[in-house]
Image (spheres, rainbow, N blue to C red):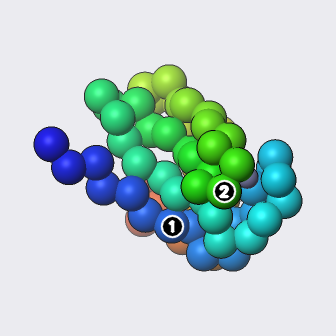
C-alpha cells in the first residue's frame, strides 16, 4: 500500500534544475525517479536500473556492495 519514496540528497532535477527535489520510489516493480517540484518523472524498466537512479545515487556516493 505504501509507496516509500526517498529523497536523493544533492541530486539535481534534469528538468527544472532544482536541487534536493528528486525522489526515488518503486511502483509495481518499476523504479521511478520523480521531481516533486516540476513533476518530472522517469521510469526504469525492471532490470534496467543502470539509468537515472544510479546516476543520482552516484551523486551521494551510494554503492552497491553486490557489485564489483
Ligand atoms: Zn524538477
Q: Is residue 43 toward the left or the right of residue 4 in the image?
A: right
Quarter of the view holding residue 59: bottom right
Precedes in sequence: disc 1 or disc 2:
1
For the image, the number of numbered tags is: 2
Label 2 C-beta lies within 8 Å of the nearest ligand 1 atom: yes
Proximity of marks 1 and 2: CB atoms separated by less than 8 Å = no
Q: Is residue 40 toward the left or the right of residue 65 in the image?
A: right
Q: State the SS at label 1.
A: strand
- Mark 1, residue position: 7
Depth check: give the residue in front, 44 or 3. 3
Name the residue furthest front.
Answer: 38
Vertically, is 19 above or below 4? below
Mark 2 Cα-neighbour bin, 10 Å: few <14, some 14–19, many ≥20: some
Cα–Cα gap, marks 1 and 2: 12 Å
Please provide percent x and percent y for residue 32: 50, 39
Depth check: give the residue in front, 34 or 68. 34
Please provide percent x and percent y for residue 44: 54, 31
Q: State the SS at label 2.
A: loop
Amino acid at each position: 500500500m505504501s509507496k516509500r519514496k526517498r529523497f536523493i540528497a544533492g541530486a539535481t532535477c534534469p528538468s527544472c534544475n532544482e536541487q534536493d527535489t528528486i525522489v526515488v520510489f518503486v511502483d509495481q516493480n518499476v523504479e521511478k525517479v520523480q521531481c516533486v517540484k516540476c513533476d518530472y518523472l522517469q521510469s526504469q524498466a525492471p532490470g534496467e536500473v543502470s539509468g537515472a537512479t544510479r546516476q543520482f545515487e552516484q551523486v551521494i556516493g551510494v554503492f552497491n556492495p553486490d557489485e564489483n
